[in-house]
Amino acid sequence: MSDSEIILVILITLSCIPTLASLSKLDQWWIRGFDFPRLQISLLQLILIFLCLYLLPYQAFWHYVITGIVGFNFLYQGYKIFPYTMFSKKQVLRADKKEGPEVVSVLVSNVLMDNDKYHKLLDLVQKEKPNMLLTLESDSKWEKALEAIEPHYPYRVKVPQDNLYGMHLYANLPLRDTQVKRIISKEIPSIHGYVQLKSGKWVRIYCLHPKPPSPTEDDTSTNRDAELLVVGKHIKENQESTFVLGDLNDVAWSRTTRLFQATSGLLDPRIGRGFFNTFHTKYPFFRWPLDHLFHSDDFKLVTLRRLRSIGSDHFPILIKLCHQPEAMNQQEEPEADREEKQWADEKIAKGSPRQKVELSKITACS
């Protein structure tokens, strides 16, 4: 075996780690971290395929074996991200209307607590004029800066915190029954309530920002996953028109996010349209979609855009939806099978005991 073949075998062996980690159900942060860079991993696998074809003489059986292994890795990673390409079937159909009382626009922005370029977000809000603005990582300084938009957004829920998990919700549409809940941890708030469209329709909203699995935040993804799935099960049980928005600290194609969709029955407008990567603003090659808005199947998409940087490590994202009840018969709602339901229950059971108390408090309103 030549030196180049030895190096190639080592590289291919190492490249198998992300796929093996992804296939496992382990929650350790370094394992779940491989869910994020699937596009980058796919490109690495493609490079390895070309190296195999260039360097290997294919005179021995193992030459075909390692080429097959790297080919499988490439196909697996590609299979996971394929739904978020323009070649895949769209999960959410295009709306018939672009304006009207049934249309609502939402801007989600993780502002980065230490970011002091407040004017950039204010200018963006003035330009886009969303019906709802959700800021994440917003502290008392951001709250003070955002007072400038309050005349245009009379309905507000403010949760300033200096631990990177503050959030503020601003709306020019009526809000009702809003509550700040802490499903998993006292440090991690979420906003629950209803927003009324101009048509009079009330829509349930959940604003979330769970902790990510990382060595500096949470050793495992257990609590993040439990929070998402607790909310997902509640949505399914109540069968209301619903939005879930926020920085979920998880990518759209992860097993947990897909399980959340199957558990809740909510749709993802990115499927069939693109990645809409929102993090990280400074590293173009290392970006993935962390900021989300999922919705029930009685909405269609008007527009979905990633907006310009406001100085944060996240790009803001803007979505405009149209409430069309007939869409329920035109769009397929994700459904969890028996294995997925069991896995969701197991993940919730592993979460903090606090989430079990909070779950009983999340009640639907008539």
Image (cartoon, rainbow, N blue to C red):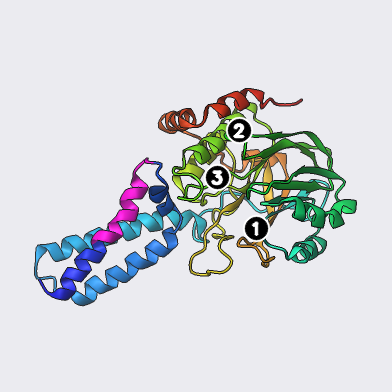
Q: Residue at x 43, y 52 (%)?
A: 33
User: What is the x, y in percent for residue 200?
Assistant: 84, 38
Image vertical order of residue 227 relative to residue 356, above or below: below
Horizontal side of 267 relative to 346 (left or right) equals right
Image vertical order of residue 108 relative to residue 219, above or below: below
Horizontal side of 162 relative to 230 (left or right) equals right
Nearer the observer, 113 or 35: 113
Q: Quadrant of the N terminus?
A: bottom left
Query: CA separation, marks 1 and 3?
Result: 15 Å
Work out whether mark 1 precedes mark 2 in sequence or the reverse, and give the earlier one.
Answer: 1
Determine which residue is flagged by label 3. Answer: 211
| Mark 3 crowd level (few <14, some 14–19, many ≥20, 10 Å Cα) | many
Q: Residue at x 54, y 59 (%)?
A: 275
Residue extending farthest to the right is: 151
Horizontal side of 237 relative to 343 (left or right) equals right
| Mark 1 crowd level (few <14, some 14–19, many ≥20, 10 Å Cα) | many
Query: CA separation, marks 2 and 3?
Result: 12 Å
The amino acid on which the numbered mark 3 sits, given as a three-letter code, is: Lys
Determine which residue is flagged by label 1. Answer: 112
Nearer the observer, 306 or 114: 114
Image mark for residue 365: none
The amino acid on which the numbered mark 1 sits, given as a three-letter code, is: Leu
The amino acid on which the numbered mark 2 sits, given as a three-letter code, is: Ile
The quarter of the picture where residue 110 lies is bottom right
User: What is the x, y in percent for residue 145?
Assistant: 80, 57
Image vertical order of residue 225 relative to residue 10, above or below: above
**Which element type, helix, strand or loop, lies under badge 2?**
loop
Q: Residue at x 85, y 49 (%)?
A: 153
Determine which residue is flagged by label 2. Answer: 183
Prevailing secondary structure class for the magenta stretch in the rendered image: helix
Residue extending farthest to the bottom is: 54
User: Which residues make up the magenta segment?
Assistant: 13-26
